[in-house]
Amino acid sequence: MNVNSRNRHYARKKWTVVAAVLTLGASLLSGCGSREAKAPTDYDFYIFNGKTENAEALDKVVDRYEQETGLTVKVFSLGTTDSAETLRAEMNSSGKPAIFSTNIGGVTEWAESGAILDLNDASDPELKALAEDVPEALRLSVDGTQNYGIPYNIEGYGLIVDTRMVRDLFGDDQTQPFLDDFQAATYDEFETLVNAVGDYIAAGTAPSVKLNGRSYAFASRKTELTSRLTGVFAEAGAEKWTYGDHMGNMALNAVFGSAVVARTATEEQVDELQAPLAKLARTLDLYSTHAAGPDGPMERGPSYINSTTASYDVSVQLFSSGKALFIKQGNWVYPNIAKLNTDILPTLTFLPIKLPLEQSDIQVDGLTVEKFNRSVPEFVPSYYAINAKVTPREQELAQQFLVWLNTSEKGRQAIVEDFQFIPYNVDDTVKFDNALNNSLIQYKLDGDTLSNPFNGSPAGGGYWGQEVLGSILQERYYNRAGAWTADDYETIAREAVQGWKDVMY
């Protein structure tokens, strides 16, 4: 989960090489360590897979492909810890992979070395069409003109809630209306709701609240479930990626429509982050003053950022045991929750993260405050890329495999059932046992999604989000008791913007 600190004065082109595997999804999923390759001595083409969590499933899928085609395929899967160096070694070996894993952090390295095929120039017309169907905001590119990869899958995050808790707070017949109205609610309505839930937790009573203009009254008495609540949010103050990366990404979405746009931003565009980041600080103030602890509220101060009391694992435990109404996490958290409380799994869903933005804060064409506040970030953590330095035959076979994987019945079935991945070209026929995956699919089908511009921030995402914004928050604000002021919000934003510019310009 941790990202190594980096020198603040990297040259503009160097940081993308250093951060080759530092994407949001790769940082947050626990794929570490390697496994033995499915490695025949003689093979037709070679796949280098950088996602350990789908290693066994990929072996099974390739077995089916071999049986169907008569080809022999070498597969090597490696965890995220050292995959950048191992991939470099493989790409420079005599037995180069024809398909390899990369991401927005690593693409510049391979583009500059001429080792990645622009799928705009693919020789297989089916693969070329498949690549053209990847939405622009999800494309793997250096400057927005190329299309270098086919997405492994889509991941996303938001406020996860157990809908049974909503039922017990507001009544069974109010559950679905509440979820619908929450999505459409303004930030001010959200803030009022958070404060009211905090009052209800403390005193067992609170005034009714409005979401999307509709009133919701709290239950007259607590149930066994709502009696467990100790706070509104399960926070992980020890984990800078949860607020530096995730929440920082929310503010960046107001200015940058994609990671590519963020990576190529001018200094003037970076200055436009001041207002959204100040609004983000206000939101983080709200979250951190309504955090759940094991036996009562979690107060800001040393324990709020201590790894034994405020880690990722602790936050998941608090949410899974019903101590918090919300946890801000992604669909990758589902297996962790499953280990702790299987009862909660069918009733989980995503709700959008809201910021108190004004329309003047938003610089992305076509994005309104209303759309921003009803949307969730969805993004591609890894891509399949084709090595332009292998033989033409290997390139052709690699293209055919990616077409089969993403268009054939067996291939698409494998993505959903074996990998348990949300396809980037998902449609309404795809259903999972995983309720969080299904929730993300619905947001995508509704067109209510944001992007991952944080992956285009200095040093590939992890550095700015954690070592700049995250460190400001953790070391100077979460670490002390007392109220934050409007001046604090502006200071956090100003220093985060300056931290970006210190690295980039």
Image (tube, rainbow, N blue to C red):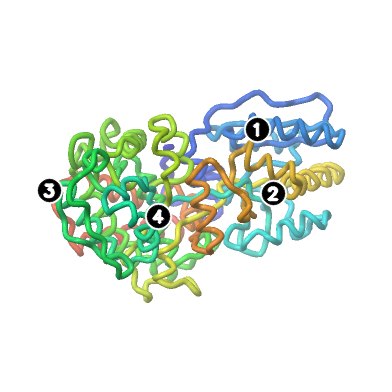
Q: Nearer the viewer, mark 2 or mark 4?
A: 4
**CA–CA distance in space, label 2 to label 4:** 42 Å
Which residue is identified by label 4? 351
Which residue is identified by label 1? 57
Q: Percent x, y for residue 174?
A: 33, 57
Q: Earlier in the sequence, mark 4 or mark 3?
A: 3
Question: Three-letter amino acid code at disc 1?
Answer: Ala
What secondary structure is found at the residue carrying circle 3? helix
What secondary structure is found at the residue carrying circle 2? loop
Question: Three-letter amino acid code at disc 3?
Answer: Ala
Q: Earlier in the sequence, mark 1 or mark 4?
A: 1
**CA–CA distance in space, label 3 to label 2:** 63 Å
What secondary structure is found at the residue carrying circle 1? helix
Which residue is identified by label 3? 203
**CA–CA distance in space, label 2 to label 1:** 31 Å
**CA–CA distance in space, label 1 to label 3:** 50 Å
**CA–CA distance in space, label 1 to label 4:** 30 Å
